[in-house]
Image: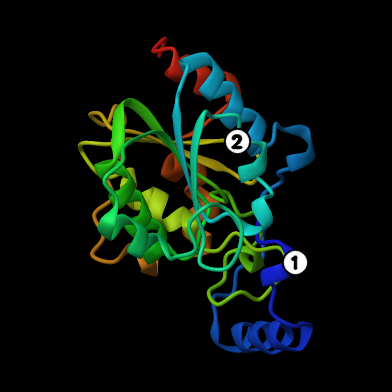
Amino acid sequence: MLLNQYIPSKSVLFFRRLKFYIFGEKFYKKLDYDWHKYSNRFDIINKIIKYKNYNSYLEIGCQSDVNFEKILAPNKIGVDPMDGGTHRMTSDDFFKDNQKRFDIIFIDGLHEYRQVLRDIKNSIKYLNEDGVILIHDCLPSKIWHQTIPQTHSSWNGDVWKAIVECRTFENIDTYTCIADHGLGVIFNRKNKNRLNLKLKNFKELKFKDYFKRHKEFMNTISESDLFNLIENKI
């Protein structure tokens, strides 16, 4: 989730939240995820790197190197317009000139649907065969954790909507691992469980839709299922 450095002031969050109370979606049920019970993202990433003997790693969004510095890949590139990583630029600018390919790509940049979807599509172009893309913050527990703009100090954004749209694509295989606020998982191969959801604009999905159908929408899997997928056992 978004760390303290990028959180708007309390007064800004208050007025945004008040505005959402008045004009936004009225749905306040929440999902019961206790993220302390699950593995964190960097341990899962490192476990994948070790198991697959991956060499090259790209991270989009490296705020304060909280995740980036813990990754044990021989060749690492981190992209962030503000701090952390190795490249001080937006992900859009990075992909414009990039010539490298990567074994594993971790997306944790701007937590807004359109940007996340663009980062996913760009990442697929530079993913090595047998590589994997991971996306952070895919399972918000409350409506306040996914509002745009941000209205709460703990914020996943509407990353989940990008995952739902990816689930409808024929040529990528998309899952969500139940760990560390939801880790999206994308393989560049035929979709094994394509979501039949015909929408013109996935941005218009409501939190109520997600709450009622999130296991189906997100194609949720356990950490053990993730490594069975990595090992091609399922």
Give the residue drawn at x 57%, y 71%: 147
Q: Are marks 1 and 2 in contact (CB under 8 Å)?
A: no
Distance from label 1 to label 2 (Cα)? Answer: 24 Å
Return the residue nearer the eye: 26 or 163: 163
Q: Secondary structure at mark 2?
A: loop
Q: Residues within 10 Å of mark 2 (few under 14, many from 20)?
A: many
Residue at screen point 36% across, 58% down: 94
Could one spot residue 179 in this view of the protein? no
Left or right: 226 in relation to 143: left
Q: Position of residue 87 (x, y in %)?
A: 48, 57
- Left or right of 208 on screen, residue 199: left
Q: Which residue is mark 1?
A: 4
Q: Position of residue 81 (x, y in %)?
A: 51, 67
* Picture colour scheme: rainbow
Callout 1: 10 Å neighbours few (<14), some, many (20+)? few
Q: Residue at x 71, y 63 (%)?
A: 154
Residue 3 sits in which quadrant?
bottom right
Q: Earlier in the sequence, mark 1 or mark 2?
A: 1
Picture residue at 60% right of the left edge, 29% below the top: 72
| Location of residue 87 with respect to 7 vertically, above or below | above
- Circle 2: residue type: Ile
- Total numbered labels: 2
Q: Where 19 falls versus 94 (above or below)?
A: below
* Residue named by callout 2: 178
Q: Position of residue 216 (x, y in %)?
A: 44, 40
Query: Is the N terminus in the top left, top right, bottom left or bottom right quadrant?
Result: bottom right
Give residue 2's position: percent from left, percent from top: 66, 61
Q: Against 180, is 148 above or below?
A: below
| Front disc: 1 or 2 | 1
Asked if residue 126 can be seen in this view, the reply is yes
What amino acid does circle 1 point to? Asn
